[in-house]
Image (cartoon, helix red, strand yellow):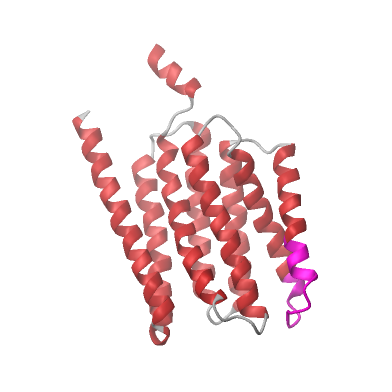
Amino acid sequence: MKNIFLENKILLTLNIVLALLIICFDICLINMHDQAYIYKVLASVLFVVLGAVNFAYVYKRTDQRNALFKYFMLIGLVFACAGDIFLIDFFIIGAILFAIGHIFFLISYCMLHKPNWLDLIISLCIFAIALIVILVPQIYDFRGMLPIVIVYALVISFMLGKAISNLTRKEYKLQNLWIMLGSLFFFLSDLMLLFNVFTDISGVFGTLCLVLYYPAEIMLAMSIYYANRKTPENSAKINEN
């Protein structure tokens, strides 16, 4: 019991330190544009490290479905990191990498709770709202990238929709809360990026994008820790043994 407490204390300290470092680099990224590339790379690599730290802790501590969750979540973080770096100079490649990362995030959410009709309904409602924001205001200059923007919006809408749907389930409540908040922040961050990249009214939107984005990645990376939580059914089996 003492060893478990010590492990959790060390893990908590690592999570806090890494999260604070990411936020510090995020603040530097917002305020020091001449070194933006360096701060972005450092912050992005660190949220992968944060996910990997939690992955290492929960390795072999999870039930079967949650075990698959942590693998797909970590892969999603790696693709998000790569997308973040490529987005600086190669926007389309970065967007594609992000979309692939969202697909892995979506798969990881499905490892917690199987896909169902509620997922589809919520996701399509979010996508409908996203389409209205993208297509109705005549303020954008997509420079031929409208199809990419729409496909990307579809992918992240299903990611957020599944995260919201999972929150209605009884199992993995705390884990699903972290995931939903991280997914929501990610969605809102991309909305800010839409205004920042494709309109002439960018201004504060670039800052809002960064303010939302790195906390989103921190929450998703930290959600891996909760993969060591057993379902009530598994806990009962352990107690019987």
- Identify the residue at image location x=65%, y=57%: 156
Whether residue 241 can be seen here: no
Question: Picture coordinates of residue 221 (x, y %)?
Answer: 44, 52
Taking 230 as reference, is 136 left or right? right
Above-or-below relation of 230 to 150 = above
- Identify the residue at image location x=67%, y=79%: 198
Compare residues 203 and 90 and report the one nearer the observer. 203
- How many numbered marks does the figure carry? 0
Question: Picture coordinates of residue 76 (x, y %)?
Answer: 53, 56
Question: Picture coordinates of residue 130 (x, y %)?
Answer: 72, 61
Compare residues 204 and 197 and report the one nearer the observer. 204
Quarter-of-image position of residue 230:
top left
Stretch in magenta: 130-148
Q: Is residue 18 magenta?
A: no
Question: Picture coordinates of residue 47 (x, y %)?
Answer: 41, 60
Of the 4 image quadrants, the one containing the C terminus is top left
Taking 160 as reference, is 148 left or right? right
Above-or-below relation of 234 to 115 = above
Quarter-of-image position of residue 101:
bottom right
Above-or-below relation of 189 to 137 = above
Whether residue 198 can be seen here: yes
Q: Residue furthest bottom?
A: 34
- Identify the residue at image location x=75%, y=51%: 125
Compare residues 128 and 112 and report the one nearer the observer. 128
